[in-house]
Image (spheres, rainbow, N blue to C red):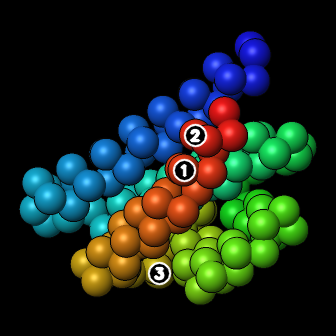
Amino acid sequence: MDRNEEIRQWLHLAEEDLSIAENCANYMHPTPDERICNLCQAVVERYLKVFLLVNNVIFKYNHDIVTLWKQCEAIMPEFNRFASHITILADYAVFPRYPNELQLSESDMRLALQYAKDIRAFVEPLVKGGN
């Protein structure tokens, strides 16, 4: 697969996850807050990976958004503004997938959605302009 096709696929997956998260948040009652938070983490993970791909940086195929974010920040220090976003969303990569004590609320879910949208708004113009 060529680089442009890979970028297109990463963007598609990120948008698909965000759309599913938003639809669940808006139309499911009760809302599956933990699953939506997990999807928001995946959205951010994919946007960070596509940013790295556009900048020819090799990344590991895992769910460690802290490491991905640090790689992005090394390229563009402006990523620093998302430190709190990344810290919160990082916990949603694994815990919501398993039975556990993590009990997320609707406000956690709404915050995760906003964080995913914030990072998308920052990264999308960078990757679409560089693609």
Residue behind mark 3: 101
**Left or right for 18, reference 66:** left
Q: Is residue 122 above or below residue 19?
A: below
Residue behind mark 2: 128
**Left or right for 83, reference 68:** left
Q: Quadrant of residue 105?
A: bottom left
- At mark 2, the secondary structure is helix
Q: Are marks 1 and 2 in contact (CB under 8 Å)?
A: yes
- At mark 3, the secondary structure is loop
How far apart marks 2 and 3 lie (CA) works out to 39 Å
Task: Work out whether residue 98 can be spotted.
Answer: no
Q: Nearer the viewer, residue 15 or 21?
A: 15
| Sequence order check, earlier mark of 1 and 3 | 3
How far apart marks 1 and 3 lie (CA) works out to 38 Å
- At mark 1, the secondary structure is helix
Q: Residue 21: give x, y in percent of width and height.
A: 32, 53
Q: Is residue 74 above or below residue 19?
A: below
Q: Residue 44: give x, y in percent of width and height.
A: 56, 58
Q: Residue 3: give x, y in percent of width and height.
A: 75, 24
The N terminus lies in which quarter of the figure?
top right
Q: Amino acid at mark 3?
A: Glu
Residue behind mark 1: 125
| Sequence order check, earlier mark of 2 and 3 | 3
- Look at 57% across and 28% down and name the residue there: 8
